[in-house]
Image: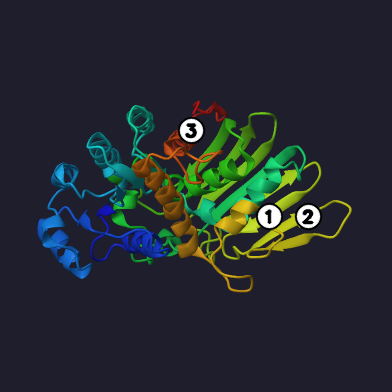
Amino acid sequence: MGMVGGGRGAFIGSVHRMAANLDGKIELVAGCFSSDPEKSKLSGEDFFLDPDRVYGSYAEMAEKEAAREDKIDFVSIVVQNHLHFDVAKTFIEAGINVICDKPMTQTYDQAVELRDIVNNSDRVFALTHNYTGYPMVKEARRMVDDGELGRILKIVAEYPQGYAVGDVEGDGQGKINNWRSDPNIAGISNCMGDIGTHAHNLVRYITGLEIDEICSELTAFIPGRELDDDGNNLVRFEGGAKGIIYASQISNGDENALNIRVYGTKASLEWHQEEPNDLIVKYANAPRKVYRRGNDYVGEQASKYSRTPFAHPEGFIEAFANIYLAAAEAISDQIDGNSAPEGGYDFPTVDDGVAGMAFIKATVESSASDQKWVKFPKV
């Protein structure tokens, strides 16, 4: 693999590297780790890379790697939002597969254009909506697919964080990074783009349902901010189900409390990211059940993406690594000329990226509208 971004001091870059390394199938061999060539060089030294494969710009990296006999098999893109489109386009057009951090692009129009570029190529494109990598999220999806919940009536997805609440009164020392609150870099949303898209993606992954209409209220509680730090969304899904998607960075006391509840006519399920090894299934006329990761009663996908036996908890890095593991399978098959397995590969794709950008676009438009209920862009 190669990497663009993620150099010294970058949190998400180290997460991607740990995730890629976890199963011993992927090796970091090249990168452009900063827009500052000297910082990129120093980061390359940190990772013990050949100096000839540490680049001063992503354009130089794409050109020179594409020309090598031993070129990288894929690039991991972990730069700021406004660069995702240009970097991904550059590498796809250079014939190099892409794994990209979310949100996929800065704008919905860019997302649609990037999907066309990917679909017109023969390259693999994976998006790191990492929460779909948890084994018990995969088990929840299986239960819905197998009809164990019956017809879906209601979905509630929440992603509350409280780390920025101090900034509301001016004593939080800027907990929301400056670039995330800058529309020129982050795009048209902060909270919905950063974490709201994760809640939306979790709904789509588990239930397979698409949004038909949405009614949103986004708020910037932090004085002087142009972009939202809190948002509430009422949702009407295609097929008649209703729901709520809520995301916040000023929910005092919450840490990373992503959770989802799916209510069906036969049963309901509940999953919490902070207790990811448990999946709760509830019934109207029977005791609730708790399914645990690593046991032999879970489905094939949940088993495939578990690494340790039951009672040995797996968490964030392992879930992230499952995206890389699935993408590595697809890239290896591409290199070897093998056909995709029946059902495809289990990682978020460019279509999920378009859906995420459609979610951001619709919430911002609804929040600014007097009409409130707006049709969701077709994805």
The mark nearer the N terminus, 2 or 3, is 2
Could you say which quadrant of the image residue 264 lies in? top right
* Residue at x 23% of width, y 67% of height: 47
The residue type indicated by label 2 comes to Lys
The mark nearer the N terminus, 3 or 1, is 1
User: Tag 3: Cα neighbours inside 10 Å, few (<14), some, or many (≥20)?
Assistant: many
The residue type indicated by label 3 comes to Ala
Could you say which quadrant of the image residue 54 lies in? bottom left
Q: In which quarter of the image is the N terminus?
A: bottom left
CB contact under 8 Å: marks 2 and 1? yes
Farthest right residue in view: 285
Left/right placement of residue 295 relative to residue 75 reads right
Q: Disc 2 marks which residue?
A: 282
* Residue at x 29% of width, y 62% of height: 10
User: Tag 2: Cα neighbours inside 10 Å, few (<14), some, or many (≥20)?
Assistant: some
Location of residue 179 in the rendering, given as x and y in whole percent from the top left corner: 29, 52
Location of residue 33 in the rendering, given as x and y in whole percent from the top left corner: 21, 57
The residue type indicated by label 1 comes to Glu
Query: Residue 270, labelled with which disc?
Result: 1
Location of residue 361 in the rendering, given as x and y in whole percent from the top left corner: 44, 34
Give how far apart the Cα atoms at labels 2 and 3 are: 32 Å
CB contact under 8 Å: marks 2 and 3? no
Query: Residue 362, labelled with which disc?
Result: 3
Element class at badge 2: strand
Element class at badge 1: strand
Location of residue 89 in the rendering, given as x and y in whole percent from the top left corner: 27, 36
Left/right placement of residue 98 relative to residue 131 reads left
Could you say which quadrant of the image residue 305 lies in? bottom right
